[in-house]
Image: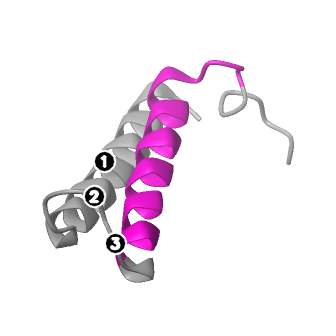
């Protein structure tokens, strides 16, 4: 992936995290739904970091060519 594609995908994951973060109530989640929403936010931010920073050169490799 080139840098433009990585920026687009990373910004989409940040948008997913933002939308899910809006649904979480302030404070520590006490229900299973709140915990799952928090997990989705953390996972989306992790994926955004992987696409934007590409720390292990995972996204830049072309394994399917």
Is residue 24 one of those drawn in magenta? no
The residue at 71%/20% (across/down) is 56
Give 60 or 49, whichever is nearer the viewer.
49
User: How far is mark 1 from mark 2, CA to CA?
Assistant: 21 Å
Kindly check if marks 1 and 2 are in contact, taking CB atoms under 8 A apart as contact.
no
Q: Which mark is residue 14?
A: 1
> Callout 2: helix, strand or loop?
loop
Which of the 4 quarters of the picture holds residue 17?
A: bottom left
Q: Say which residue label 3 marks.
A: 30
Please tell me which residue is depicted at 72% across the width and 30% down the height of the picture.
58
Q: Residue 32 at x, y = what percent?
A: 45, 79
What kind of colouring is applied to the model shown?
Answer: one colour
Q: Is residue 7 above or below residue 42?
A: above
Task: Work out which quarter of the rendered image holds the N terminus and state it.
Answer: top right
* Percent coordinates x, y for residue 60 in the rendering: 67, 27
Callout in the foreground (1, 2): 2
Which residue corresponds to the image point at 52% horizontal and 44% vertical from the top-left? 47
Mark 2 surroundings within 10 Å by alpha-carbon count, few (fewer than 14), some (14 through 19), many (20 or more): few
Say few, some or many: other residues with alpha carbon within 10 Å of mark 3 (under 14 / 14 to 19 / 20 or more): few
> Who comes first in sequence, dot 1 or dot 2?
1
């Amino acid at each position: 992936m080139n840098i433009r594609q990585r920026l687009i995908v990373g910004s989409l994951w940040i948008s997913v995290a933002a939308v899910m973060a809006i649904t979480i109530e302030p404070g520590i989640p006490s229900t299973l739904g709140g915990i799952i929403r928090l997990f989705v936010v953390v996972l989306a931010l992790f994926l955004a970091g992987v696409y934007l920073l590409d720390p292990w050169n995972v996204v830049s490799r072309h394994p399917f060519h």
